[in-house]
Amino acid sequence: MRVSRWSAALACSLVAACAAPTDLKVTPPLSMSVVSGDGQQGTPGAELPDPLVVRVEDARGRPVPGQIVNFRVVSGGGSVFAGAAISNRNGLAQERWTLGFGDLQRVEARAIDPATGDPLTFAVFTATLADSIPPFTFGVNAFPNPAALGDSVIVTAMVSDSFSGGSNIAGAEVQVDSGPFLAMSAGDGTFDQQNEFVIRSLFGLALGSHSICVRGRDAAGNIGFPDCTFLFVTDGGGGGGDSIPPITSNVVAIPNPSNPGDSVTIRAQVSDTFTGGSNIVGADAQVDSGPLLTMNASDGAFDQENELVFRTLFGLSAGTHLVCVQGRDSVGNTGSFVCIVFTVGTVSSGDTLGPVTLNVSATPDSVAPNDSIRIRAEVRDTFTGGSNIAGAEMRVDSGGFVPMFPTDGAFDQQNELVNRLAVGLAVGSHTVCVRGRDTAGNTGNQTCIGFSVAATSPLPGSPRRGRQQP
């Protein structure tokens, strides 16, 4: 049979192709190196613009195709898209990386040497968070207040970066008067979230009035401005033993909002661990201005220093309700009420009144150039139509209005605490005005305050109250 010269050429080509792998036999051990994608910067929770690229080589420096490479996030949270890739003919394997919210962002590329079974040398990628806005602190409290001489005082606060960069909180500190900042602890034991409840016990406080200031630090290294409260230490009381009432926290209403006819369960946590160490013996809930209602222990018995408590409510009327919870310990101390607002039913569409803005403050109210300043306010529609607050905005001097953020993370109530940072302000006096908007579409009047930017920044002072303007 005749074989054409083209058939012969094709046969030779196939033979050569089959022989090629023998010529390119991999020489162990393999190695892995970073080609590109290391050292990027990105927003917390966002995918980095460039892929992570590694190269797999054999002992002679030749590319190794077909090698499985695993990409694993080892710190900082975040995620990779596929988790594994196969090296191409150039020995390259790629992956996409979405950053987390923690401090040290790190991904390692790993593989197993097919010849020896040994782990390959890690190819390590790191990234930094692009968050340049510090977290804000609110809800600073001291328990008990006033305190007796010799009492321990528990300082608590909330530190949040949800709306000021999105990084996890990495730490918090408390300062008494002009003393050093002291490290605080995370209420749940570890700093690993964008919102952290923080706590610190103080001892040996002198008689008189004290300024207690708390500030937070996020995973990107930004340190926020202190938020302060006042503590009074007196020479009365404190006759030994546990004289400090328990602390109530995490009050919630489920569901919120609810429909008319639904049952609503109020839950809370009552703790005496840091305020005397006595067992909790009971808790009460009060709805609006009604009588105290006995709450139940979630585990069936009040026999611990920390108790989860609940009470189910029935027959609530449509509208907004205020529920307050307090706890009692086994030596007779009754704690302060901690309150939340919840809603039953839908809001009437006849609301034509804008919400009221009050308690506008600037913290601190005098800063140095390039410092940021926290603007806070409260927006209410409870007595001007009863709609939920849908948003708030502020403007500095004659500038345009910019959105403000809800402190609790969502605009879903008739009363909302809002905040926003103002940065890059020039030296001199400034005016900031805040106004709110409800779900019925009504925009309220502005409430304005003055503050100043000086050549040097004074110690944090008390925020100024606002005046309403049309």
Image (tube, rainbow, N blue to C red):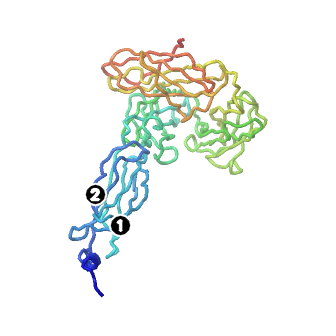
Q: Which is nearer the eye, 301 or 157?
A: 157
Q: Position of residue 69 (x, y in %)?
A: 36, 64
Q: Relative to 148, say whether 445 is above or below.
A: above
In the figure, is residue 36 to the left or right of 284?
A: left
In the figure, is residue 148 to the left or right of 423?
A: right
Residue that carries the numbered disc 2 in the rendered image:
34
Q: Residue furthest left?
A: 60
Amino acid at circle 2: Val
Q: Position of residue 15 (x, y in %)?
A: 27, 79
In the figure, is residue 115 to the left or right of 342?
A: left
Q: Quadrant of residue 147?
A: top right
Q: Relative to 235, say whether 126 is above or below.
A: below
The residue at the point 63 percent across, 23 percent down is 381
Q: Quadrant of residue 164?
A: top left
Q: Residue furthest front?
A: 2
In the figure, is residue 460 to the left or right of 279?
A: left
Q: Which is nearer the eye, 380 or 212?
A: 380
Q: Mark 1: give few (<14), some (14-19) or many (20+) Cα within 10 Å.
A: many
Q: Relative to 356, say whether 347 is above or below.
A: below
Q: Which is nearer the eye, 248 or 287?
A: 287
Residue that carries the numbered disc 1 in the rendered image:
111
Amino acid at circle 1: Ala
Q: Position of residue 282 (x, y in %)?
A: 69, 42
CB under 8 Å between callouts 2 and 1?
A: no
Q: Name the disc covering residue 319, or none.
A: none
The residue at the point 28 percent across, 53 percent down is 36
Q: CA distance from mark 2 to mark 1?
A: 13 Å
Q: Secondary structure at mark 2?
A: strand
> Looking at the image, is mark 2 or mark 1 earlier in the sequence?
2
| Quarter of the N terminus within the rendering | bottom left
